[in-house]
Amino acid sequence: MLQKILSRQFFLKTIESIATLALLTAFIAEYAFGIQPCPLCLYERYVYAALIILGIIDSFWYHPALFYLVLVVILGGIGLSFYHVGVELHWWQAPSSCVGISGISAGNFEDFEAQFMQKPVVRCDQITWVIFDVSATIWNMLLFCAMGLYALIVKFKSC
C-alpha cells in the first residue's frame, strides 16, 4: 500500500484531486458565500488549474517529466502563496493591482464612475476569510507546502 502511495502516478492523481477540491472550495466561497477573491487569490487559482490540467494530461499520457513539471508548478504555488501571506501580514507592500481598482479603462468620468460602482475593491493586504481562526491565505500556503513535501518524499523514495 505504501509503495502505491509513493508512486509518481498516484502522486499526480492525488495532487490533481487536491487541486480540484481547493478550486471547488474557492468557487463555493465566492459564489455561495459572497467572499470575493483578491488578485493574488486569483493567481493562486491559476496554479491549481495548472495542476488539474497536468493531472488530466497524466490520465491520457504518462511521462516521467510530468512529475517534474508538477513539482515546478507546486514550487511556484509555494512562492506565490508565501508572497500573499507576507502581503496580508504586512511584511511587505502589496502590488498596485492589490490595493486599488484593477482593470479600469474609462474614457471619461462617467465611464470611470460606472465601472467603479460595479467593481468592488478587494485588497490583498486585508484578511477576508478566516477558517478556524486562521486566514485562508495561510491555509492555502500550508496546502501548497504539504503538496511540496509530498512531492519531495515521492522524489527521494524513487531515487
Image (tube, rainbow, N blue to C red):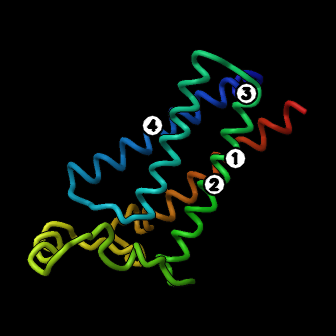
The three-letter amino acid code for the residue at tag 2 is Gly
Question: Which residue is drawn at the image coordinates 53% and 25% (left, top)?
Answer: 56
The three-letter amino acid code for the residue at tag 1 is Val
Q: Secondary structure at mark 3?
A: helix
Q: Is residue 66 left or right of residue 156?
A: left
Q: Which residue is mark 3?
A: 8
Residue 27 pos. (x, y %): 31, 47
Quarter holding the C terminus? top right
Q: Residues within 10 Å of mark 4 (few under 14, many from 20)?
A: some
Residue found at the very far front of the displayed protein: 107
The answer to which image quadrant residue 65 occupies is top right
Q: Which residue is mark 4?
A: 20
Camera-nearest residue between 80 and 152: 80
Mark positioned earlier in the residue sequence (1 or 4): 4
| Label disc, if present, on residue 76 of the rendered structure | 2
Q: Nearer the viewer, mark 4 or mark 2?
A: 2
The three-letter amino acid code for the residue at tag 3 is Arg
Q: Is residue 105 left or right of residue 88?
A: left
| Distance between the alpha carbons at the discs numbered 1 and 3 | 15 Å
Residue 131 pos. (x, y %): 39, 61
Q: Is residue 48 above or below residue 87?
A: above
Given contact means CB atoms under 8 Å apart, are the residues at marks 1 and 2 in contact?
yes
Q: Nearer the viewer, mark 1 or mark 4?
A: 1
Q: Residues within 10 Å of mark 1 (few under 14, many from 20)?
A: few
Question: Which residue is drawn at the image coordinates 74% and 25% (left, top)?
Answer: 7
Residue 93 pos. (x, y %): 51, 84
Q: Nearer the viewer, mark 3 or mark 2?
A: 2
The answer to which image quadrant residue 21 occupies is top left
Mark positioned earlier in the residue sequence (4 or 2): 4
Camera-nearest residue between 70 and 152: 70
Question: Which residue is drawn at the image coordinates 55% and 76% (left, top)?
Answer: 86
Camera-nearest residue between 49 and 112: 112
